[in-house]
Amino acid sequence: MTETPAALAALLEKALAGEPGGVSSGVERSVESRVENVTRLSGGANMETWAFDWHSAQGARPLILRRLPPGAADASSDAVLVGSIDLPTEAAVLRQAAAHGVSVPTVLLVLSDEHGLGSGYIMSRERGEALPFRILADEKYAGARRGLAFQCGEALGKIHGIPLAVLPPGLRDLEMEQDLDRLQGLLDAYGNTSAVHQLALNWLRDNAPAGGARCLVHGDFRNGNLLVDEQ
């Protein structure tokens, strides 16, 4: 695997066009298919995010490649790195979320070994702002701010309403006490140097709610993980 934009563009073209060495997974083959403007975006230490434009007989389409960084062992290490689920499972959850009315990007292709791109998937690139200080201060988003809390509640409600039966295997299924034990283990692994985190865990144990219905939860629903436009 390589990080050069030119090499990535060639691999992406094969994957999306269904040429030898790439499996298109339903993406229409086109002799005119080409990839341009491959650009690395900031995606944190655990994941790589690349923006690019895919040109085919159907026109130009802005897309995103989300993958493990080069040098990561394999897809099985994904859950360790992110503390959650592997990328193929994440893509499957996104597809189910879309089918149940959640505003999420469209997953076009889940990568396999034949693609030579590592573990990850390709999805639509949606417009919007993710930086909290711009969303909170820019006059451009004044209208959005008035409805954002309600829209966030709607999105969470739709996520929680996805039937468990349609979800892929591989998702963590934990009672609250188990999850608090997991978080305590992570905190201890780093020397437990954060009094704030320990106090928060203690409070959660002391104020645990009575058991309720099991449902899918996002796990990291916050500013920075939301795209906001003027609406």
Image: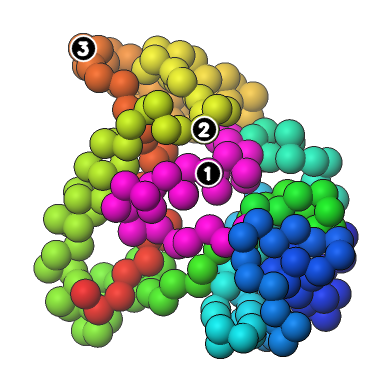
What's the mark number on residue 210? 3
First in sequence, mark 1 or 2: give its number.
Answer: 1
* Amino acid type at image mark 3: Ala
Read off the residue under disc 2.
168
| Colouring scheme applied when the structure was drawn | rainbow
Q: Residue at x 26, y 36 (%)?
A: 161
User: Badge 1: few (under 14), some or many (20 or more) residues near its Cα, within 10 Å?
Assistant: some
**Magenta region:** 82-109
Q: In which quadrant is the N terminus drawn?
A: bottom right
- Marks 3 and 2 sit apart, C-alpha to C-alpha, by 27 Å
The picture quadrant where one finds residue 21 is bottom right
Q: Secondary structure at mark 3?
A: loop
First in sequence, mark 1 or 3: give its number.
Answer: 1
Q: In which quadrant is the C terminus drawn?
A: bottom left
Q: Secondary structure at mark 2?
A: loop
| Residue 73 appears in view | yes
Q: Looking at the picture, how far across and down is residue 75, in whole percent?
A: 74, 40
* Amino acid type at image mark 2: Pro
Q: Looking at the picture, how far across and down is residue 65, in whole percent?
A: 64, 64
Q: Looking at the picture, how far across and down is residue 46, in whole percent?
A: 66, 50
Read off the residue under disc 1.
92
Residue 96 in the image: above or below residue 1: above
Quick one: 204 or 222, which is closer to the camera? 222
* Amino acid type at image mark 1: Ala
| Residue 60 appears in view | no
First in sequence, mark 3 or 2: give its number.
Answer: 2
